[in-house]
Image (cartoon, rainbow, N blue to C red):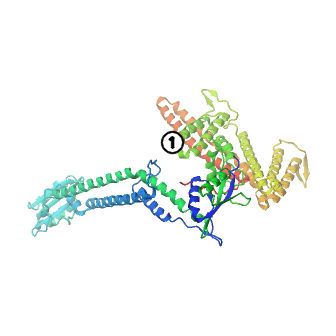
Amino acid sequence: MLRPYEMSSVIVTGPKSLQEKAIEELHKLKVLHIVDHSKNELADIGKPLEIANKLSELLVKARALITLLKINTKEEASFEIKRGLLEIEVTIKKLNEEANTNFEELKKIEDLISRNAKDPLAQELEILGNTNIPLENFTNYKSIAYFTGYLKGKQAVLELEIELLKSTKNFSLFDNIIKQKNFITLFIDKKYEDQASKALQKHGFSAVKFSNISGLKGFASNHLKKIEEEVSRLEKKKQEIKRNIEFIRAQYKGFLITAEKLLSHELEKAEAPLKFASTSSSFLIKGWVPNEELIKTIDRLNKSTHNKIFVHFAPANKNDTVPVKLKNPKPVNSFEVLMNLYTIPSYKEIDPTFFMFLTFPILFGFMLGDFGYGLTTLIIFMILKKSIPKAKDFFNVLILSSLSSMVFGMVFGEFFGHEELFGYEIPHLLSRSHSLMPLLYLSVGVGLSHIMIGLAVGFINEMNSHGFMHAVYAKGGWYVLLIGGLVITADIIKIIKTQSVVISGINTTYGILVGIGIILLSAVMLFKGEGIKGLIEIPGIFGNILSYARLMAIGVSSVQLAIVVNEQAGQFFHAGPFMAFFGVLILIIGHLINIVLGLMGSFLHSLRLHYVEFFTKFFEGGAIKYSPFGLKS
């Protein structure tokens, strides 16, 4: 649990004729983490199998069809490909032609529909569609002038007609409403064109020119009807093609999902030699296998190649770059999601996941620390865990943290910010709203304990890597430093009482002098264990411990906000039945906001205290994650 799976270095080598069988077997086993070979004088990088180009081409086509047909590859697909690659190749070729034909036809029809909708002639005909004027009348006359356009105002047409009658009766005025505007067509004797133009401008006339209807005869409505019939025909054709595409999608969805997976599977095998060392007659694979899978792997490889390949294995050396596969039981392994956000522990390090499992919920619960809030978030996270199964590990972390919040809610005696229910005080060990200094001391005490655990783990890591004495200097020196700091602090706050002494005119105590002496001893130890870096970081460890005061600060801010919400809602409850409704709203919205803020603050600050204060005492990380060949498939 505190260590990853033990790994062995494995070298597989044999004649080129058996390379494909070895790849096939390793792909089935899914245990070998392959180390990429770098070209050198002894061996070149291997070449992909001959079928790789064909597989790559088919895979690109399959994925293009999946994208074109908008198929969700995450759906379950119960389809069996019986004839393997031949069936995939033939079906994809046929499907590609069929799908492309339909999509090309669909694009042409959509372009025609769009063109008809934007056609200037159609737009002009739409304006003239309700006018009973033959289109051939809109031409140039020697003795008649005509105007077409919009007038402003409801009475504009009547007023225009009255004004024109003052000049002449030789005119014809047609009007109709188009998009809530007055559209008019005016034919008038050419002699009165100027008077008509002035009268129109007086009524806010906006001219519309019809430049595309020239040569047309009959009424606009008839021509418009023909265009609408053509558009309707195109729409029917469009829907028919869409049904064809939907039929293709439904019919071939299972095939394409299965084919994509199979081709990815085969291409991974075909391109595997690019990671191998290769000569003209042999191949060599280097990688890592978990010890518990080693014997089975060797047996299966020998059996599949009839004992004609050579497998060499050896335990990991001190300086090897070993891929790491974490080894944690449930529910500890859920906290690996928090490790993945940071970095993976190296092969020789102690895995911090277990410590995250122990301390993350405690720090989280200390800050949120309300039974009602913990119960609410517990229910929400349990529902979300069922709704989003892929994030179950993350929600497992939050569920444990919510349970911790409920426990601390009982310690602090809080229920949605209340310390009393139905007139009775909730039993508690410590009040966050009345005992700030004890809470601060407790927060710093938690920080000191947390950091000392980190230093203890660091001691073990240093001892495993560099020996016992180096661990004593590098990590034991920090313990000595903390002891010195505690002695000085205890003397200052009178936990211990020592005799006063005057040195160079300065009045001090033996306790402080002893503490300073211990700190100087720790500085010597740290310099010997960590060099100048250790001395520079001496002030930092006290800052790390004080950083845990945020446990108190965030918790108290959450309590105070809950109290404000409750008091504001209480004022409405005392104002009568009608106002009580607003009091309920304030309670719901206020506590909901406080829960969200509390969750964010507690989660992020718990992470920070681990990543910055705790991990820096023992953890380096930076390992490569174990990724066995064949796992992607």
- Direction from residue 510 to residue 595 in the image, left or right: left
Name the residue carrying label 1: 387
Position in image of residue 452 (x %, y %) = 76, 47
- Direction from residue 527 to residue 293 in the image, left or right: left
Position in image of residue 512 (x %, y %) = 86, 49
Instruction: Residue at 58%, 55% (x, y): give it.
Output: 25
Q: Residue 348 is drawn in which quadrant? A: bottom right
Instruction: Residue at 52%, 40% (x, y): give it.
Output: 386
Q: Nearer the viewer, residue 419 or 2?
A: 2
Q: Residues within 10 Å of mark 1 (few under 14, many from 20)?
A: few
Outermost residue, top direction?
A: 423
Position in image of residue 86 (x %, y %) = 43, 58
Position in image of residue 201 (x %, y %) = 21, 62
Can the viewer see residue 205 in this picture?
A: no
Q: Amino acid at mark 1?
A: Ser
Q: Nearer the viewer, residue 576 or 376?
A: 376
In terms of secondary structure, where does tag 1 sit?
helix
Can the viewer see residue 615 in this picture?
A: yes
Q: Nearer the viewer, residue 111 or 220?
A: 111
- Direction from residue 577 to residue 611 in the image, left or right: right
